[in-house]
Amino acid sequence: MFDSPPPNTLSFRLDPWPEEYASALQIETGDLSENPPPVDTTVESNDWSRPVTCSVSSRPNPLVFIDGVQQVEARLVAEHDGRFLNAALVAIAAGAFMSRPSSASIESVRVDRICAVADQDFAAAAVVIPWGEGSLHYRPRNFPGAGYAAVAQAIDDARRALETDLAAEMARAGHPLVVLDGRLSLYPSDGAAVVGYTKTLHTRYLPSPAWDLLPLLRPGERTPLFLIRQHTPLFSWYLRLALPRAADHPLAGVVRLETVASVPASEAMALASLTAGLLPSFASEPWRDPRAPQNLLPLASLETALRRELGERLHVRRAIADYYHAASESAA
């Protein structure tokens, strides 16, 4: 028998993601917040006491999921006139998982390699590594700032650009719904057909009592639409993919989606209801994916296929090491 905790003490619940992954609930100091931009919670309704229940009678054909992966193949230190800079040779890839009623396929896979450098002032040259009968080409990519944080940002920007270009291409092809993993940090010009899918909750956009609706959501339910007032305004909504297990924290299984606010609010509401009615059927389970249920099954399958496209990292790293050893010996 367990004793009741004394008043004013912390109550603990499990975070269902394993320790090798960052939590799906990123809590900043004092709150789930990063100085969020102002929001308008009256776009769809003034009543945030109950969720919006959604169902779909027909599904888009195909339903497109876009995701990307990155693989740091070697960390480097660049030197110029006695100054040292962090850098890295990185492979990135993006692709589309096409879900149809009777089949699924992975299409439009794109692979790129970059030499990411933590400085804007020094132009890095392309790096060409011998690889079998061919070569691996790393194009330069600078990012202002110092240290490996700037390198990581250069990598992230390059991967996001690859993903967003592919999402925009899929929207231009007329596909009715394109789910892009991650925030719409770059904005496809094709508007409502593309939604950003955020499985990690970094920011508390909603004030109470609107925020208090999130733990009450059930699978297939969403919050009303709200407007995020930022440089490029976004319509956004939360939905639940699956119920948390008894020991999990109450926001497990809740994700946030967004689309550009250049479309009419009525179109964004229809899109929100479509995602809430569809996406729970793609929710992963713990025995299939350690980031269940937020990492949807199509995204997990796509990530696995894309990593195969990048090649074995240890083999690539060995080729890079051989290249720099040979360069050092020839310079000696």
Image (cartoon, rainbow, N blue to C red):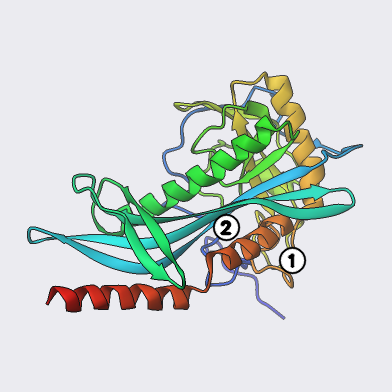
Residue type highlighted by circle 1: Ala
Whether residue 37 appears in this view of the structure is yes
Of residues 242 and 177, the one drawn nearer to the viewer in this rendering: 177
First reached walking from the N terminus: tag 2 or tag 1: 2
- In this rendering, the answer to whether 246 lies above or below 279 is below
Q: Which residue is mark 1?
A: 246
Residue at horizontal 52 percent and vertical 74 percent from the top: 312
Could you tell me residue 296's position as x and y percent? 70, 56
In the image, what residue occupies the spot 65% across and 70% down? Answer: 4
Q: Label 1: few (<14), some or many (≥20) within 10 Å?
A: few
The answer to whether any part of residue 11 appears in the image is no
- Residue at 64 percent of width and 40 percent of height: 257
- The quadrant of the picture occupied by the C terminus is bottom left
Give the residue at x 82% y 52%.
Answer: 281
Question: Which SS class for mark 1?
Answer: loop
Q: Are marks 2 and 1 in contact (CB under 8 Å)?
A: no
Q: 314 or 184, which is in the foreground?
A: 314
* Residue beneath disc 2: 24
Question: In the rendering, at what x and y percent does residue 250 appear?
Answer: 67, 56
Residue 9 locus on image (x, y percent): 53, 64
- Can you name the residue that lies furthest to the front here? 133
Viewed as shown, does residue 222 lie left or right of 94?
Answer: right
Give whichever of 246, 90 is nearer the camera: 90
Neighbor class of circle 2 (other Cα within 10 Å; few <14, some 14-19, many 20+) is many
| Number of numbered discs on residues | 2
The three-letter code of the residue at mark 2 reads: Ala
